[in-house]
Image (tube, rainbow, N blue to C red):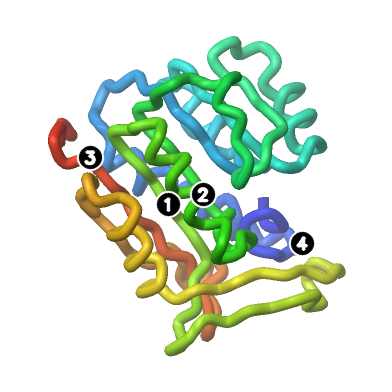
């Protein structure tokens, strides 16, 4: 969990702390006693499947990594309401998915997507006409984006590339592509115990389709 969420292979427990905090944040926005159809774009290790396995009807997780999908299918093989599909966020095959979901989750994915592909991702999310959208992404706290290309991480022991956009950049795109949604809540997710850095943090946005605001 630490490696996936924080880029840290040390067993500090910070990843579990972050997951628990984020789970509680998202659940606080959703209707109580709800049964929701959920689409998770970039499901990774299946943490949202685990977080929502009791209320998902169904949960569909997508990830570019076939290794993650294989592991998730094995981990949750006894739960028929959870399904996993190897699929890129920028090339979603809607023919194997539901036409509509109550909740779409996309966390920690957009930083790996180029600007010219973001439009496609947001338009695809819109096409599912979800009641709720939860976006969480790493952001740069400086005045401009931070772009890394083939950057060597001492913690991950490998090269990686990512775009740390500013919160303002994402909010401009959210207003542009999700016009019928109300941004009910946004905030920084991390503190010093869960991976906050001087230059970067993770920000979340919870969007609710305006014409049916039924959260209780």
Q: CA distance from mark 2 to mark 1?
A: 15 Å
Q: Which residue is pictured at 52% across the width and 77% down the height?
A: 200
Q: CA distance from mark 4 to mark 1?
A: 25 Å
**Residue marked by disc 1:** 135
Q: Residues within 10 Å of mark 2 (few under 14, many from 20)?
A: some
**Residue marked by disc 4:** 9
Percent x, y of residue 209: 23, 39
Q: Which residue is pictured at 34% across the width and 32% down the height?
A: 129
Upstream in sequence: badge 3 or badge 1: 1
Q: Are marks 4 and 1 in contact (CB under 8 Å)?
A: no
The mark closer to the camera, 4 or 1, is: 1
Upstream in sequence: badge 4 or badge 3: 4
Q: Are marks 4 and 2 in contact (CB under 8 Å)?
A: no
Q: CA distance from mark 4 to mark 3?
A: 38 Å
Q: Which residue is pictured at 38% across the width and 67% down the height?
A: 188
**Residue marked by disc 3:** 209
Upstream in sequence: badge 2 or badge 3: 2
The mark closer to the camera, 4 or 2, is: 2
Q: Position of 189 compared to 194: left or right?
A: left
For numbered disc 1, what is the local secondary structure? Answer: strand
């Amino acid at each position: 969990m630490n490696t996936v969420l924080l880029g840290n292979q040390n067993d500090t427990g910070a990843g579990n702390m972050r997951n628990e905090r984020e789970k509680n944040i998202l659940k606080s926005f959703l209707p109580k006693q709800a049964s929701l159809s959920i689409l998770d774009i970039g499901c990774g290790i299946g943490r949202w499947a685990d977080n929502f396995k009791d209320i998902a009807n169904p949960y569909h997780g997508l990830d570019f990594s076939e290794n993650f999908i294989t592991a998730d299918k094995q981990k949750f093989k006894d739960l028929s309401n959870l399904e996993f599909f190897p699929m890129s966020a920028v090339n979603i095959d809607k023919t194997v998915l539901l036409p509509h979901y109550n909740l779409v989750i996309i966390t920690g994915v957009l930083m790996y997507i180029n600007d010219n592909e973001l439009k496609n991702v947001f338009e695809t999310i819109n096409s599912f006409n979800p009641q709720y959208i939860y976006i969480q992404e790493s952001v740069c706290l400086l005045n401009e984006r931070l772009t890394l290309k083939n950057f060597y991480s001492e913690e991950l022991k490998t090269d990686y590339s990512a775009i740390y956009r500013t919160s303002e950049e994402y909010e401009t795109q959210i207003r542009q592509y999700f016009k019928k949604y109300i941004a009910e809540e946004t905030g920084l997710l991390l503190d010093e115990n869960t991976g906050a850095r001087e230059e970067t943090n993770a920000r979340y946005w919870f969007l609710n389709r305006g014409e049916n605001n039924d959260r209780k």
